[in-house]
Amino acid sequence: MTSEPPPSDPEPIFTEPGASWLWVLLGPIAAGAMILVQRGAGVGFQPLVPLMFLVLVSGVLTIQVKAARIHTSVELTRDALREGTETILISEIVTVFPAGPTCGAPTDCASGTCASGKCVLACPSTACETGFTCNAGACEGNPECVISGDCQPGEFCVFGGCVAPKMCAKNKDCDPGQFCVFGFCAAGVECADHTDCPAGEGCFEGACTAVP
């Protein structure tokens, strides 16, 4: 009976050592620099000082590089992800962050429709509120502008909204329905910062978006 060889570790897909041992070479470089300083000062060769620099610099850097290679190194294989001294199986990552259902046609989805290979909630155009359109199964707002040429003379396009050249410091400096964006009052945007959005949402590019 022949025994099977033990399984080898999977081939790494990505590795990051955390630190390079080349940093330790600064010890000999520092010692050599001290020898040059001694010669330039005309005091002759005194081995104690270069030796102290060699031991101290090399010793400290060796400890730091070793610690970095232990605690900050990263290795990714097909089976596991190791970050420092902690390892997690890829199967466990998929369990925490499961992949969304895939589809090739609307009939593949239990509910909603198929868009870009994923099942999304379906919305007929009549189901969206005024100012919103149905795009890939989701209601999306229509921007007031795409470029500044879409706005009235003297206005600028910022985050899909036309901004009048009215200076402001806070939202209260603007007219009702406008927000203070980059020092100008902007219409057609939902928010200027996170405090303008309801709880559980944040302000991203002028729109309140749910924060996971």
Image (cartoon, grey):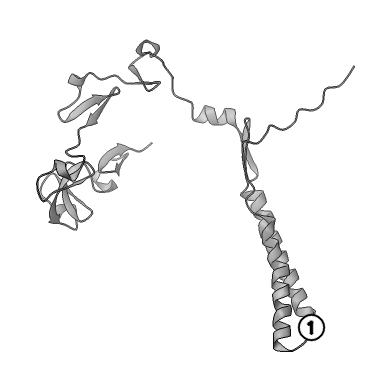
Instruction: In the rendered view, tell whether residue 22 sits above or below residue 203.
Output: below
In which image quadrant can residue 141 be found? Answer: top left
The residue shown at (15%, 41%) is 150
The foreground one among 27 and 56 is 27
The amino acid marked with disc number 1 is Phe
Q: Residues within 10 Å of mark 1 (few under 14, many from 20)?
A: some
Q: Is residue 60 visible?
A: no
Asked whether, in this view, residue 132 is left or right of residue 101, the answer is: left
Which corner quadrant holds the N terminus?
Answer: top right
The residue shown at (64%, 54%) is 19
The foreground one among 56 and 17 is 17
The residue carrying mark 1 is 45
Asked whether, in this view, residue 77 is left or right of residue 98, the answer is: right
Percent x, y of residue 113:
33, 17
Percent x, y of residue 86:
63, 41
In which image quadrant can residue 7 be found? Answer: top right
Instruction: In the rendered view, tell whether residue 19 sits above or below residue 10.
Output: below
